Image (cartoon, rainbow, N blue to C red):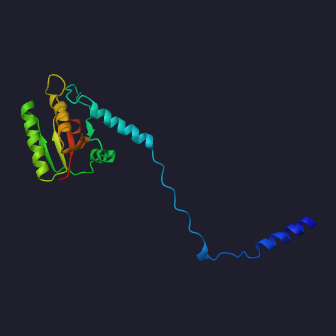
C-alpha cells in the first residue's frame, strides 16, 4: 500500500506542469498517405504496348473481329484508354470503303496531313470489316501498318461499337 502512495506522489510530481490542451492547440491530423501505386500492373501494360509495337505491322491476316490498339512509346497509357472510351470528340472522318490498297494509302496520307494542318486531334478512319474480301480484311491490316509509320499519330484504337466497332479506328494526332 505504501508503494502505491509513493507511486501516486511520484506521478503527481512528474505531472505537475502538465495542463489540458485548449481546442486551438490540438494538433492537426496527419495528411492521409497517398494511395499505393500498382507498379507491376503499369509494367505489364507497358510490356503489352511494347509487344504490340514490335509485332510485325505488315501482317494482313487480321481477323475481322480483332480490335486494333497501338500507342507511341512514351505516351501515357491513360491517353490510349481515354481515346478508347470516347473522351476525345471525333472531329473528322475518312471512309476507305471501295478503295484499292494504293488509293487507300494515298487518301489516308492526304487526310492525315490535312487534319494535322487544321489542328485536329481526333479523327476516325473507317477501313471496314473486310466482309467483301474473299480472305481476311485487307485494308484493316494496311491501315494498322500505315498509322504506325506516321510521326503525327500518337495512338489509335478500334472504335466503340456505336462508332464503327472493329471496322474503324479512332486516331489521336499530335498537337501542332
**Image-based side of 33 in relation to 150, left or right:** right
Q: Quadrant of residue 140?
A: top left
What residue is at 83 percent from the left and 70 percent from the top? 10
**Image-based side of 28 in relation to 74, left or right:** right
Q: Quadrant of residue 13?
A: bottom right
How far across and how far down the image is residue 91, in percent?
Answer: 16, 51
Along the viewing direction, whichever of 34 and 66 lies nearer the viewer: 34
Residue 129 seen from this side: no
**Residue extending farthest top:** 134
Along the viewing direction, whichever of 170 and 29 lies nearer the viewer: 29
Query: In this figure, what is the number of numbered marks?
Result: 0
Residue 120 seen from this side: yes
Where's the N terminus, which quadrant? bottom right
**Residue extending farthest right:** 2
How far across and how far down the image is residue 64, in percent?
Answer: 22, 29
Q: Is residue 115 above or below residue 7?
A: above
Along the viewing direction, whichever of 65 and 176 lies nearer the viewer: 176
How far across and how far down the image is residue 74, in percent?
Answer: 30, 44
Along the viewing direction, whichever of 146 and 60 lies nearer the viewer: 146
How far across and how far down the image is residue 143, in percent?
Answer: 17, 35
What residue is at 20 percent from the left and 34 percent from the top? 144
Q: Quadrant of residue 44?
A: top left
**Image-based side of 79 in relation to 98, left or right:** right
Amino acid at each position: 500500500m505504501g508503494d502505491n502512495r509513493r507511486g501516486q506522489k511520484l506521478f503527481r510530481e512528474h505531472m505537475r506542469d502538465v495542463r489540458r490542451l485548449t481546442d486551438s492547440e490540438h494538433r492537426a491530423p496527419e495528411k492521409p498517405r497517398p494511395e499505393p501505386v500498382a507498379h507491376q500492373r503499369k509494367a505489364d501494360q507497358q510490356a503489352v504496348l511494347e509487344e504490340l509495337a514490335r509485332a510485325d505491322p505488315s501482317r494482313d491476316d487480321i481477323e475481322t473481329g480483332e480490335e486494333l490498339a497501338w500507342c507511341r512509346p512514351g505516351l501515357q497509357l491513360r491517353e490510349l484508354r481515354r481515346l478508347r472510351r470516347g473522351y476525345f470528340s471525333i472531329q473528322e472522318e475518312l471512309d476507305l470503303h471501295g478503295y484499292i490498297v494504293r488509293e487507300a494509302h494515298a487518301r489516308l496520307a492526304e487526310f492525315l496531313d490535312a487534319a494535322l494542318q487544321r489542328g485536329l486531334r481526333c479523327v476516325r478512319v473507317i477501313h471496314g470489316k473486310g466482309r467483301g474480301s474473299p480472305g481476311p480484311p485487307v485494308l484493316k491490316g494496311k491501315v494498322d501498318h500505315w498509322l504506325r509509320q506516321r510521326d503525327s499519330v500518337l495512338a489509335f484504337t478500334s472504335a466503340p461499337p456505336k462508332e464503327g466497332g472493329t471496322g474503324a479506328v479512332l486516331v489521336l494526332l499530335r498537337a501542332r
